[in-house]
Amino acid sequence: MKDRITLKALAELQLGQTVWDTEQLGFGARRRKGGVFFVFKVQRRGKADWVPLGRLGDVTLDDARKAAARERGIVALGGRPGAWRRTPTLKHFGARYLREAASATKALSYAWTERALRLHLYPALGHLRLDEITAHDVTRLKDRYATRKGAFNNARRALSMLYAKAIEWRELSADWPSPCRYVASYAMPKHERYLSQKELAGLGAALATHAQQGPAAALVVAAVRLMIFTGARRDEVRFLRWGEVGPTALHLSDTAAGPRSGLKTGAKPISLNPPAAQLLAALERRGDEDLVFESPLRPGHPVALHQAWDQIRRAAGLKDVRLHDLRHSFASVAVATGHSLYVTGALLGHRNSRTTERYAHLSADPLAAASAAVARRIQTALEAGEGEAKAKGGAS
C-alpha cells in the first residue's frame, strides 16, 4: 500500500499491513504486535536492504522521515544503508564499559558507575544510541533531578566518562561532542562535618550497644571502628582482604578481586596504630583472598554498612553524620593535636597536597597554642632578665 505517511494513516493501519511513503522513496511503516515500526528499504546489487528506524512512540514520525532521508543520502553517495546506525545504545555500551573498563578504573569504580547507570541513566537514556543523545536530553534529565542534585551530578559524571571511553574505543569519532559538555553539574555546598570529643563519646556508646545485637552487628561495628581509628575510606575497609593486612600497615591493592569504589588513589599503605591492630587481631583470620569483613549472611560479599550506620548514628544523636565524615574527623583530630598538613595528608593517603588543604583552618587552635607556649617561654626569659636588672639596681 502506498500513501503519504501521516499519523492518521498510521492509526488506520491494520495488523500486518505496510504503507510506503509516496514522498520519501524507501520510507515505510508496518503495524506489528508491538506497535507501528518505521523502516527504510532500498534495492542494492539485486537484493533489498532493510534498515529499522524505530517504533512510533520511541521516535516521532518527523524523526523517522528524517532518518529515512539520511539513509537515502548515504545510498546516493555509494554508502551502505544502516552503517551509521551501528553505534551501540547507551545500555549496550554501558554493559561493555562495566565489563571491560570500570572495574579497573580508580577514579570511577565499578560499583559507583553501575549504580549511576542502573538508577539514573538507563531509565531515561538507555534505549538511545550514543550518537543520538544530545545536550538537550541531558538538560531534561537535569531538570528532572532538580531536587536530587547529587544524583544528577553522579549520573553526569558517569555519562561523561562513558563518552570518553567510547571515543577511545572508536565507537565515536575523535571529534564527537559529549552531550555533557554544555550541561554543567549542580553546584553543591561542601559538606565538612567533624565530630567533637563529646560526639565521639556518644558514638562509642552507640557502637557498643549495636555490637550486642549479634555477630553480624559486631562485625559492622568493627568495620566502623577501623574507619575511625585509621581514617580509611568506607570501601577501603569493606573490601579489605586478609592478604592486605600486615603487622604494621594495611597494604591496599587496586587489583584486589571485587570492586573497591573507595580506593581512589591506587595501591597504598595505611598505617596500623595500636587500637586498629588490636581490633584486627581480635577477628578470626582466614585465607589471604577472604574478606576481613565478610557478611555472615552473604558469603563472599562485604558487610552492608549503610542501614546499620543509619541505626548507629541515630542512636548517637548524629543524624547528619555520614560514614565519610569519620575520615574528616580523623583528619581534624590529627591537625588539632599539632600534626602538620603534610603528615595528615600522608596518613590519609592524599597524593595531592591541595586535597589536605581543606583542613588548614583547623590548625588555628594548635598554632595559637604553639604561639602561646613560645611567648610564655620568651616572657619567662625576659622577666628573668628584668629581675636581675632590678636586683643589681637595688644593690647599687
Image: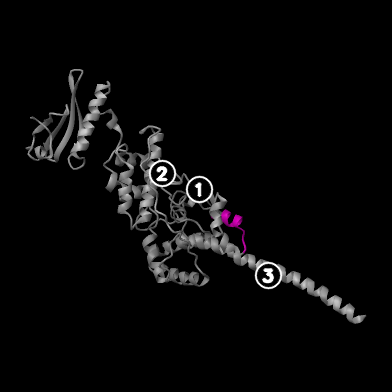
Front in this rendered view, residue 280 or 189: 189
Instruction: Tell me, for residue 265, which label it has, or none.
Output: 1
Q: Amino acid at mark 3?
A: Ala
Image quarter (top left, top right, bottom left or bottom right) of the C terminus: bottom right
Instruction: Name the magenta segment's main secondary structure.
Output: helix
Residues at marks 2 and 1 touching, judged by CB atoms closer than 8 Å: no
Task: List the residue tagged with mark 2.
Answer: 103
Question: SS class of the residue under badge 1?
Answer: loop
**Residue at x-position 86% and y-position 76%:** 389
Q: Nearer the viewer, residue 391 or 223?
A: 391
Along the line of sight, which residue is nearer the eye, 86 or 66?
Answer: 66
Is residue 146 left or right of 68 when viewed as pictured? Answer: right
Three-letter code for the amino acid on which mark 1 is drawn: Thr
From where the camera sits, is residue 278 visible? Answer: no
Q: Is residue 75 visible?
A: yes
**As displayed, is residue 124 above or below residue 337?**
above
Label ID, residue 372: 3
Kindly state the secondary structure of the residue where label 2 is placed.
helix
Which region shows up in magenta? 338-349
**Position in image of residue 365 (x %, y %):** 60, 67
Task: Classify residue 382 by image quadrant.
Answer: bottom right
Q: Report helix, strand or loop for mark 3.
A: helix
Q: Answer above or below: position of 119 versus 391.
A: above
